[in-house]
Amino acid sequence: MQFIKDFTSELKVVSPGRINLIGEHTDYNMGYVLPTAIEKNITFELQKNGSKDTCNVYSKTFDTGFELNLNRIARSNVEWQNYILGVLNEILKRSDKLKGFDCILESNLPTGSGLSSSAALECGLAYGLNELFDLGLSKLDIVQLSQTAEHTYAGTQCGIMDQYASVMSRADHVILLDCLSLESNYIPIDLNPYKIILLNTKVSHNLATSEYNVRKQECEQGVSIIKNKYPKVDSLREVTQEMLANCKNELSQKVYNRCSFIISENQRVLQMADALRLKEHKKVGDLLYDAHEGISKLYEVSCPESDFLVNFSRPFDTVLGARQTGGGFGGCTLNIVHADAVYDFVESAAKAYKEKFNIDLESFQVEPSGGTTAISLISSN
């Protein structure tokens, strides 16, 4: 693209991906989650270009870009562009200060890996434009407009967790987030001598075209039926297993299973928070395995590759626990592995995975990291 030749960055933004230790699909059910940002991220370089409404966005990672006009924002047939366009659409609803800009972005987040590259893209752009044009948006504004952008332009009816974690995370902590009230607590995470190891199945998923939105609809269907017997219920957050059992005859087995998983998963999040506070490492691992059973059997958002890797980890006494992480249907498994055994475990898993699926397994260690940051590159002198 022509603008790259004369590009001089005014602002650098680093927007991280995230892991969710536990609490899968609970966010859009107004429940609890326990995410943190990780050091893998998307980097944005931004400059004002002096125009009123012409913008250029270029991805170094994929060597592709596009030009857009702020007065003619509309959904694109190119998937990744919709995350950008959705954010701009939401900003324009909130501010008249946004003008023409150029943006170069680069990512080391594997797409489709369940590490929320989409939220990193949305939040990083919103954060950077807020700084560049002094839009006056709060961090929570950025989180919420990015979530709305994903709903309206990307077509994924996600909860708020991914965007919240990308912006609000704190190094060496996980966030116990109440997705109903948006109250949060930062909980120190010290798993020493264990490490968080992600194994990337390399089975990619597209949430907008997968079963993600279907699961949300199934949960809503469950709530509407439960509400007939318990009128005060507005979400699965307010439903107990006993209440669910009392409605079993009115629910299909599939919807019953979906609701049962969410109710139990909410409890696991709270139990995990307590286990981290008390450094009960075995409990942490047991909860991960319990969660994966629900993800696979009740919520049915796992896949053969993820199930294989989780089951492969079970005989290792150096692995505390494992589960599929992210929206589902592929992506990464999260494994808590003793530091001295990481190499041997990963080598063994990679060999077995290659033999089973003929796919080269990718692995990486992650550390709980801080949220989105911006660095001005223009001197104030």
Image: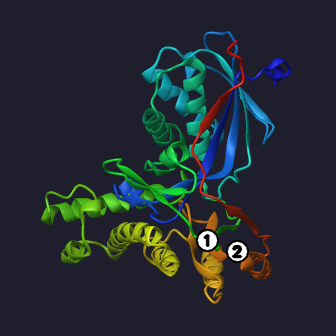
Report whether 205 appears left or right of 208.
right
Counting other residues with Cα less than 10 Å from the Cα at mark 1, is it few (<14), some (14-19), or many (20 or more)?
few
Q: Count neighbours of disc 2 (C-alpha within 10 A) and say few if under 14, some if 14 to 19, many if 20 or more.
A: some
Q: Are marks 2 and 1 in contact (CB under 8 Å)?
A: yes
Residue at x 48%, y 34% (from the top left corner): 142
Question: Who is closer to the viewer here, 177 or 102?
Answer: 177
In the rendered structure, the answer to whether residue 142 lies left or right of residue 183 reads right
The residue drawn where x is 55% and y is 61% is: 326
Q: Quadrant of the N terminus?
A: top right
The relative height of residue 296 versus residue 24 in the rendered view (above or below) is below
Residue type pointed to by label 2: Ala
Residue on which disc 2 sits: 339
Taking depth in this image into account, of 95 and 166 the one nearest to the observer is: 166
Left or right placement of residue 88 versus residue 242 in this view:
right
Q: Name the residue tied to disc 1.
A: 192
Q: Please, what secondary structure does the residue beneath circle 2 have? A: helix
In which image quadrant can residue 313 be found?
bottom right
Q: Is residue 65 visible?
A: yes
- Which quarter of the picture shows residue 272? bottom left
Residue 376 image offset from top left, x and y in percent? 67, 25
Residue 332's disc number: none
Q: Position of residue 118 (x, y in %)?
A: 59, 45
Q: Pick whichever of labels 2 and 1 is earlier in the sequence.
A: 1
Circle 1: residue type: Asn
Which of these two is toward me, 151 or 337?
337
Residue 316 found in image quarter: bottom right
